[in-house]
Image: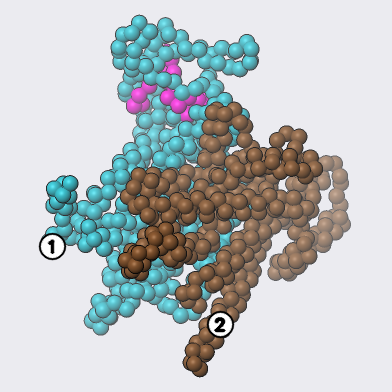
Chain colours: A cyan, B brown
Amino acid sequence: MEKTKNKDKKKYRVSEDMSYGSIILMQFRKHKAAQLGMIVLIILYIMVIFAPFFAPHDPQRRLQVPYMPPMGIHFIDTEGNVQRPFVYGVEMETNKETFRREYVIEPENKYPIKFFIRGDSYKLWGIFESDIHLFGVESDEGLFLPFGSDKLGHDIFSQIIFGGRISLTIGLIGVFIITLIGVVVGGISGYVGGATDNAIQRTIEVIRSIPMIPLWMGLAAALPANWPQFKIFLAVVVIISLFGWTTLARVVRGKFISLREEDFIMAAKVSGSNQFQIITRHMIPNFIGYILVNVTITIPTMILGETTLSFLGLGLRSPTISWGVLLRNAQGLQSISLYPWLLIPGAFVILSVISFNIIGDGLRDAFDPYAVTRR
Amino acid sequence: MHIKYTGIYMKEQNMATYIIRRILFAILTLIIISIISFVIIQLPPGDTTSIRLQVLQTSGIQVNQEQIDQIRADFGLNKPLYQQYFFWVGNMFRGDFGESFGYNAQVNQILKERIPYSLLLAFLSIIIVYIISIIGGIISALRQHSAFDYSMSVVSFLGLSIPEFLFALVLMYAFFKLFGISMGGFYSQGMRDAAWSLAKLWDLIKHIWAPVIVLSAVSTAFTIRVLRASMLDELRKPYVQVARSKGIPEAKIIFKYPLRVALNPVISTIGYILPTIISSEMIVAYVMDLPTLGPALLNAALTQDMYLVGAIVMILSAITVFGTLVSDLLLVFTDPRIKY
């Protein structure tokens, strides 16, 4: 026990010649869960950036198979032979007792899953035309729907990948607005002090005492229904980031107040730095870590905000695809008890939110100045 | 003796000024919230009568200019905006929140039916939050790095990462699949309109626990972390060591001193918990089909029934402001170290 601990210490020892950045990086490396979260997010973002390539189908294409359950990938056929992964063909039938559509597997039709297959044509980022998809089955033979299909026969897997484009970027744009407002307002509050500080702090308290979701709903209600989707998207970003900056503003203010009294700030002042230089060269680098942590834990709240608003029908609407819009299909006990796979987009929401939160945790530990000496 | 007396006097005066300041601040908050609510009402293009006129016209009633002017005058819409605001606030004090076009009823009628259920849900959820998080937080802190502590961290991490509506959906699905129970609503079929009786109360209890669990999840996750952290801080302090060395039973040490101190930050979290629960209630009530303020707000928002939207935003904010005020005032009496 003692031995492994020592070994661990050696690996993660801080030496004199290490830079601030490398110490933080080393601390972050210790947090294994955060690394896992990082990998998950990198995969998710790569998938949404190259969405048309990773999605086996065009997400707007209506395949003739409404409410198809997720298809299992098989390796062993009915005769017991192991072969390359394949899916069975399916036949749609109407159950004579319940009058419900049912899908029956046809064991005689097997479609191997192939990589780099030609399918629906697309234009990547509106520039590169192609029809190559990472995986799929030969399009005119069978279908491969890993997560099933929805009411109109859209491939849910493809929709999730395309929906991620909006759900995962809304957080990035929103967090940019929040950080900007938070740092500026918190900075003014802490640096100027006095009556300004007092007024800003009281405003923050007022904002924090308002329940956010009713306020969002009220503001989203005012959006004209005939706005184009892109405008709605921007409006949703603004609504959910409008009041989210208060936490950061408080932290920044606290940092400004404590740093204002430090000797090195006094030294900078005496040696003739102007206020702008003091703030940007000496103060902000001192709490950049807190900002970074705040950024990572604010992104998930934005993702949840968009998902919730769209789920309620107040945010983005179909045909725009986001994870919230997709979950709107899963309303009510009736549809989720019959078609539980409609909940799968929710798993992606949770996965990305947890990843961001864990990374935030890891960064907080890494930036904690006492952590190095404590361990 | 004299100095001591002045000390107590000073403290009481400070306390009084603090309480007055706190109440004044709550009133200021309410004023600002009323302005925000009013702005929300005014936001959609066109004034509120235009929707009403549309409704009238589509139902085949011809409206002439005189009648339009009459309606505008009734709502005070021909006056400048700031006068309209005072008109709206004044009416609110008289218990008149305006008219809902969607429900075709007085807004306060809709509020009257739904507020009690919203309050009941919030109240029960807060109680559950405190029960679970106090027990969980204490055990987590006392058995730090134990399996219980780790599983508690994982659960609270999940609680903070799952959107409420998804949690509600998954819970409904799980209970339907596992036990064949279909959740939703506050009452079984047929019980809803029955007169109050023990059977109806029992029916309510059988239904209400599910939304309460969903609503308390996020806040419990948050509060457990707060209590665990403050309890750990407190347990490390020298006075606990002294108490132990004197041979005071461990249970007494924990419950008599550190717990009481550690609970203070938890009490002050109500300012966070209350808005969170009220917020979640909007969504959970919609998913689980509960007759609270949530679905009414959503409906109103979707149909741009702005007077109802404004009124509900106002009421919900007022509830949280009032709740936070009460908890802050309580803290004055439970935490003698508080600075005014």
Q: What residue do we see at 55% from left, 22% from top?
A: A66
Subunit bearing disc 1: A
Label of residue A16 in the image: 1
Judged from the image, the secondary structure of the residue bearing numbered disc 2 is helix
Q: What residue do we see at 26% from left, 79% from top?
A: A263
| Secondary structure mostly seen in the magenta stretch | loop
Q: Count how many numbered circles sit on residues in the image.
A: 2
Task: Please state if A79 lies on the left or on the right of B223 as rendered.
Answer: left
The C terminus of chain A: image quadrant: bottom left
Give B52 or A286, whichever is nearer the viewer: A286
**Where is mark 2, residue-wise?**
B12
Q: Is residue A7 magenta?
A: no
The amino acid sitting under disc 2 is Glu
On screen, residue B83 above or below A1 = below
Label of residue B101 in the image: none
Judged from the image, the secondary structure of the residue bearing numbered disc 1 is loop
On screen, residue B326 above or below B299 = below
